[in-house]
Amino acid sequence: MSASPTGSRRDGRGRRPTLDAVATRAGVSRATASRVVNGDGSVTPGLREAVLRAVGELGYVPNAAARRLVTRRTDAVGLVFSAPPEGLITDDPMLSTVLRAASHELDLAGRQVVLLLAHAPQSRLRVEAYVAAGRVDAVITVPIRASDPLPGRLQALGVPVVSLGRPAARPGLPYVDNDNVGGAAMAVRHLLERGRRRIGTICGPLDLPAAQDRLAGYRDTLREAGRRTMVALGDFTRDSGATAMRQLLQDDPGLDAVFAASDLMAVGALQALRQAGRRVPEDVAVVGFDDIEAAQYADPPLTTVRNPMGEQAAAGVRLLLRLLENGPAGPVVLPAELVVRRSA
């Protein structure tokens, strides 16, 4: 046999070794050899070792297309982002964390991640068509707006779907999330316990369930304390945080604390406060949400609620793998944790 350009051996007539040849070399039936090659765990260790030894000796490479016809598996999982492609990794550190963690967890499971972008109606249609063609076994969506019909359409195709983040429009969809309500409440209680009385918030886009939940935690906690709420709208970006902070100062110059629903918005708020001549935390205390790397290097370092997106992504992959094996798939909610630094 001679080596092919791809590394597999061929016989004298240029043919690749077949599964029948593997079975003959291993001294097993073709069916047993097929089960080993396709990852069936029912084969005894001795026979599995014999087949794998024959695979190595012959340089047998399974035909991926034929394998898919038999197993109806691609061993690929679609990771659907609704963010626009421009600056997907550089502008949002949370999304890059998700991509790295999901890829690592899928690699451990012997599966491949396929990045799919669904930021506009046409791209959502392309994603739907791609999944309908059977090119992935399952899908993880992140982050999906409450009004987005894509998760429901993918479920209707019979494809297992897991959402990273609570899916407001699809209450039955399996999901993994951080305790956004509890985390926001923890942040506001921290400010109240330190004597802050006029606490505003910079919320995220209200068609995102995470923004809804963080706003609910803020409002509920202040109402229980008998304090009024002050809300400015942002979009989870640094610039929107600066703009919203200026709006809050205009609405209430006596503001002494702010809870921003993301660290990027909190960093923008710090900039606006500095430009307005307000000291942090002496005049205005600031708490963010997410605990991205930039939070510890902000000026001053940012008190924030840890949002373990890497852990969420890994848990989402494990939940999806259970779904693929017809296992239990209830929602998973990770606990919140307050990280106290100098800004509050």
Image (cartoon, grey):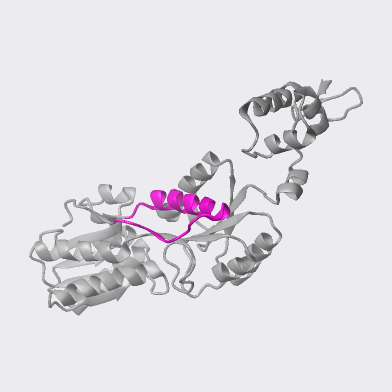
Residue 205 appears anywhere in the view? yes
Image quarter for residue 229? bottom left
Task: Between residue 271 and residue 215, name the one nearer to us.
Answer: 215
Residue appearing at x 55%, y 73% in the figure: 149
The reply to whether the magenta stretch includes residue 243 is: no
The reply to whether the magenta stretch includes residue 331 is: yes
Residue 114 placement (x, y as % from top left):
60, 51
Instruction: Residue lying at the far right in this picture: please name it.
Output: 13
Residue 125 placement (x, y as % from top left):
64, 68
The quadrant of the picture occupied by the C terminus is bottom left
Instruction: Residue lying at the far left in this picture: please name it.
Output: 195
Residue 111 placement (x, y as % from top left):
59, 44
Residue 18 appears anywhere in the view? no
Q: What is the magenta range?
A: 307-335
Image quarter for residue 41? top right
Task: Between residue 293 and residue 143, name the one nearer to us.
Answer: 143
307 vs 66, left or right, is left
Residue appearing at x 42%, y 62% in the figure: 165
